[in-house]
Amino acid sequence: MSRPVPNPGILDIAPYTPGKSPVAEPGRKVFKLSANETPFGPSPHAIAAYKGAADHLEDYPEGTSRVLREAIGRAYGLDPDRIICGAGSDEILNLLAHTYLSPGDEAIATTYGFLVYPIATMANGAKLVIAEEKDFTCDVDAILAKVSPNTKLVWLANPNNPTGTYVPFDEVKRLRANLPEHVILVLDGAYADYVSKNDYESGIELVSTTDNTVVTRTFSKIHGLAALRIGWMFGPAAIVDAMNRIRGPFNTSVPAQLAAVAAIEDTAHVEMSRSFTEQWRGWLTEEFTKLGLTVTPSVCNFVLIHFPTRKGKTAADADAFLTKRGLVLRALNNYGLPDALRMTIGTEEANRLVVDAVADFMAQK
Ligand SMILES: *Cc1c(COP(=O)(O)O)cnc(C)c1O
């Protein structure tokens, strides 16, 4: 008897285990601070655009997301023909892997790289090679040391999730300059809008000046449209052309396209969210540090909090304690970070409640 056999690599992928539905003590309000969603929601203009689309749900979308590519082009001064939109940047990352990776190929990611990278790599039969991070930060030399004749692609979230750290633009340029020309450098800028550092750039300039670098961005984070699944990539014309050949002809929906256009044009909403996040990121980092915990310096809308390994004080213990109070953070066992929790920066109320709860947790016998 023979039965259907999945393609090489597919069964090497660990099955996705969704987070448990947390149960808080009765009477506790639940704050979900586990998925890096914005506490502000999208721009009101984006919600209005989404509702407006309801009048014409019988129509197929324009297949190339043209209105959105043009809006992105205006916002960033880019050629819309070199932009491709996807159902979240997840789809873009998978399209990249599907277009450029096959069995025998290698893709490089860093120790605590985003979980989509192994999936997209192995789904195409390629091998994921890990470059060690230093202090929870990408180490360009470690990536370069892993390059082999089979390397086709490098995945780099800058800044990275779940660590929150970033690579200065000089280092990104040095990485690009020392990678072979046939290797695609994927700069995943999902959190780029949150970074306020003079030595950071998402890499759009690098895309314009090389044939082998792409930048992906998303509307799921600062724009607050995660439910609609919409993201984009800016890349060299030849890469965009190749990906467009396998992209589903109607891969983004009309409501998503229109809401995203309104979101990108509401720069005041983005700026409000960015400055709020910066303020509370600093405050949270300070407060957790005062409580004796180590916080990895973050430039994102989340912080990585490291807990002791002492019995009763571990990240798992803290997670259980916080969950009872309705404060849902992200345990990171599947990222190989069992000693840490990732907290998405929430409303002032949520942030203060977490600090109070962690103080109680650390103080308890
Ligand atoms: C959230 C996130 C994304 C965005 O995913 P979408 O599919 O656009 O929602 C991409 N990369 C990283 C590292 C992320 O954390």
Image (cartoon, rainbow, N blue to C red):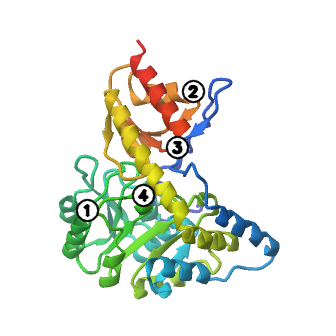
Q: Residue at x 67, y 83 (%)?
A: 62
Q: Mark 3: give few (<14), some (14-19) or many (20+) Cα within 10 Å.
A: many
- Of tags 4 and 1, the one toward the viewer is 4
Which of discs 3 and 2 lies nearer the camera? The answer is 3
* Mark 3 residue type: Gly
Compare marks 3 and 4 and give the one earlier in the sequence.
4
Q: Amino acid at mark 1?
A: Pro
Q: Residue at x 32, y 52 (%)?
A: 165
Front: mark 4 or 2: 4
Q: Which residue is mark 3?
A: 346
Q: Which mark is residue 325?
A: 2
Give the SS element for disc 4: helix
Name the residue carrying label 4: 194
Q: Kindly identify the amino acid type of the residue bearing the numbered disc 2.
A: Arg
Q: Judging from the image, what secondary structure is the residue with disc 3 in?
A: loop
Q: How many marks?
A: 4
